[in-house]
C-alpha cells in the first residue's frame, strides 16, 4: 500500500481527533465555569491509551477515535421524593429497574459537599449552554476551516483562459469522442490563432470577466465575425474571429442540446478563485441546509448503504460515510496526482464538512445526543417560566431518566448504524478519485 495513502489516513484521523477534542472542550469549559464537577475528559472510546489527572479531572486519550466525552457528576436527578444523599433500596419492573440503576450510578459519584455541583441542579440556561458548547465548537471550527478554504485558498472555478486540453477541430456533439480525426473542420479559435494560456477579456468590446460571461456572449452571438480581446503573455491584443453555428450541450444541463449557437472552440482553465468573507457565510448556510436535508433522509440513505454493503450496489455519492470511509478518502487525496494546493483544499473541505455534520447531528433533540439534553433544558426553562407567570410553585427538575429506555434503544441503533458504515466503507467504499 502506498505510504502516501497511509499518511493521508493518518492526517485525517489526527484532524478528526483534534475536532473531537475541541468539541469536548466546548462542553468542559462552560461546565467548569458554572461549577459542575467534571471527573473525566476523554477523546476516543474503549481502553485508555494515555491519561493524566489535573485537579479533580482526569484527561486522557482512548484507542478508538470514534468520539469522546466528559463525565459530569449528577447528570440524572434522584428519584422524586428520595433523599439525594441516599440510595433507594428496590424497584419493580424491568424498565424501572433500568432507570433506578442509572440513578444509583449517577449518585455514587456525588461526594459530600458536591450537592450544588451536580449537573441536574444547575439553572436551565446553564444546562443549555453546557450541552450546546460541543456543537457550537464544531460550527466555529467549520467556519474557520471554510474561511481558510474560501478566503485563503479559493474555490475551484473555470476562468476564461484557454486550456492546453483544447481541441483544434470541431467534433459534433452527436459523436462520443474527444480526439480529432483526419478531415475534421478546424475550430474558429484554431483558425484565429488562439493559444493555450490566452485570457479572453472581451467580445466586440463587451467585457468578459468569467467563463460564464464568455459562454453567454459567444453562444448568443451565433455565427459571424467578432473582435475577440485577449491577453497573451501580459500583452493585450485583438483577434478577428469568425464564429460558426453548432449544436452544443446546455452549460447547466448537459442533457439538453441547444441548436445553432455560436461556437468558438476553446476549453476553460480551472483556477482557485479566492472569495470574500461574506461568501463564507452564504457557503455555510447552503451546506447547512443540505446537511439538514441529509439528516432527514438518513433512514432512507442507510437502506442504500445496506444494499451497497451486502448486494454490491454502487454507493450513493450523497449518502452517509463513516470515519473509516472518510479516512480512506484522506488517503486517496494525498496519494493522488493532484497539485499540493488542490490536496490541501480538499482535505480542509473534508474536515470542515465533518465538523458541520457532527455539529448538526448532535443537535438532533434525542438522547443520548447533546440535542436531547438541550431539549430537556429548554423544556425545564419553559415550565419554570410558565409557573412564574402563572404564580404557581416552581416545578421540579426535568427528569431525563424517565426516557432512558428510549435512550438505550437509540444508542443501540446508532451503534448498529456505525457498524454498518464501517463495514460498507471497508467492503464497498465511496471513492473520490474513482
Image: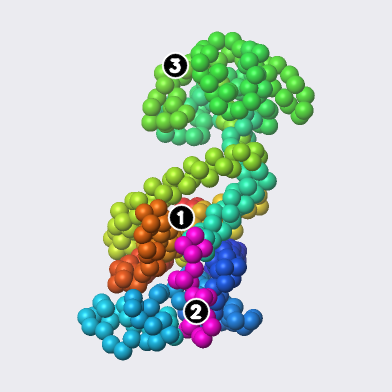
Residue 424 visible here: no
Q: In this view of the protein, which residue sits in the foreground, 183 or 5? A: 5
Mark 3 sits on what residue? 260
> For the residue carrying disc 1, how many other residues have a C-alpha within 10 Å: few (<14), some (14-19), or many (20+)?
some
Region in magenta: 109-126
Residue 182 visible here: yes
Q: Position of residue 410 (x, y in %)?
A: 33, 67
Mark 1 sits on what residue? 360
Q: In this view of the protein, which residue sits in the foreground, 293 or 397? A: 397
* Left or right: where 41 falls relative to 414: right
Q: At numbered mark 3, what does the secondary structure look like: helix, strand or loop?
A: strand
Q: Position of residue 367 (x, y in %)?
A: 38, 65
Say if 358 sits above or below 157 in the image: below
Mark 2 sits on what residue? 115
* Left or right: where 339 falls relative to 232: left
In the image, what residue occupies the spot 33% across and 78% down?
Answer: 81
Asked if the residues shown at circle 3 and circle 2 are in contact, with their CB atoms under 8 angstroms apart, the answer is no
Amino acid at each position: 500500500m502506498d505510504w502516501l495513502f497511509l499518511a493521508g489516513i493518518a492526517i485525517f484521523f489526527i484532524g478528526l481527533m483534534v475536532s473531537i477534542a475541541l468539541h469536548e472542550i466546548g462542553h468542559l469549559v462552560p461546565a467548569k465555569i458554572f461549577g459542575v464537577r467534571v471527573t473525566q475528559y476523554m477523546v476516543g472510546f474503549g481502553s485508555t491509551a494515555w491519561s493524566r489527572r489535573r485537579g479533580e479531572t482526569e484527561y486522557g486519550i482512548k484507542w478508538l477515535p470514534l468520539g469522546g466525552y466528559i463525565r459530569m457528576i449528577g447528570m440524572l436527578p434522584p428519584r422524586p421524593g428520595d433523599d439525594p444523599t441516599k440510595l433507594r433500596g428496590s424497584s419493580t419492573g424491568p424498565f424501572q429497574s433500568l432507570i433506578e440503576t442509572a440513578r444509583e450510578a449517577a449518585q455514587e459519584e456525588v461526594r459530600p459537599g458536591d450537592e450544588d455541583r451536580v449537573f441536574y441542579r444547575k439553572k436551565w440556561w446553564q444546562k443549555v449552554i453546557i450541552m450546546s458548547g460541543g456543537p457550537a465548537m464544531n460550527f466555529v471550527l467549520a467556519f474557520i476551516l471554510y474561511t481558510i478554504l474560501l478566503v485563503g485558498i479559493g474555490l475551484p472555478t473555470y476562468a476564461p483562459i484557454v486550456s492546453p486540453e483544447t481541441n483544434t477541430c470541431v467534433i459534433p456533439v452527436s459523436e462520443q469522442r474527444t480526439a480529432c480525426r483526419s478531415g475534421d473542420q478546424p475550430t474558429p479559435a484554431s483558425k484565429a490563432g488562439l493559444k493555450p494560456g490566452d485570457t479572453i477579456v472581451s467580445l466586440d468590446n463587451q467585457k468578459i470577466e468569467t467563463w460564464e460571461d464568455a459562454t453567454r456572449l459567444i453562444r448568443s452571438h451565433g455565427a459571424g465575425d467578432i473582435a475577440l480581446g485577449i491577453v497573451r503573455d501580459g500583452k493585450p491584443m485583438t483577434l478577428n474571429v469568425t464564429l460558426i453555428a453548432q449544436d452544443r450541450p446546455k452549460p447547466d444541463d448537459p442533457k439538453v442540446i441547444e441548436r445553432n449557437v455560436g461556437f468558438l472552440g476553446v476549453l476553460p482553465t480551472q483556477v482557485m478563485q479566492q472569495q470574500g468573507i461574506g461568501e463564507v457565510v452564504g457557503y455555510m448556510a447552503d451546506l447547512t441546509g443540505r446537511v439538514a436535508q441529509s439528516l432527514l433522509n438518513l433512514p432512507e440513505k442507510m437502506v442504500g448503504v445496506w444494499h451497497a454493503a451486502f448486494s454490491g450496489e454502487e454507493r450513493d455519492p450523497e449518502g452517509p460515510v463513516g470515519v473509516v470511509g472518510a479516512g480512506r478518502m484522506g488517503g486517496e487525496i494525498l496519494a493522488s496526482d493532484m497539485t499540493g494546493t488542490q490536496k490541501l483544499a480538499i482535505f480542509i473541505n473534508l474536515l470542515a464538512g465533518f465538523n458541520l455534520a457532527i455539529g448538526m447531528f448532535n443537535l438532533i433533540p434525542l438522547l443520548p445526543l447533546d440535542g436531547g439534553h438541550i431539549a430537556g433544558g429548554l423544556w425545564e426553562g419553559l415550565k419554570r417560566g410558565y409557573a412564574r407567570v402563572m404564580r404557581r410553585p416552581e416545578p421540579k427538575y426535568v427528569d431525563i431518566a424517565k426516557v432512558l429506555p428510549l435512550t438505550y434503544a437509540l444508542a443501540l441503533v446508532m451503534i448498529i448504524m456505525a457498524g454498518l458504515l464501517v463495514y460498507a466503507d471497508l467492503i464497498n467504499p465511496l471513492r473520490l478519485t474513482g
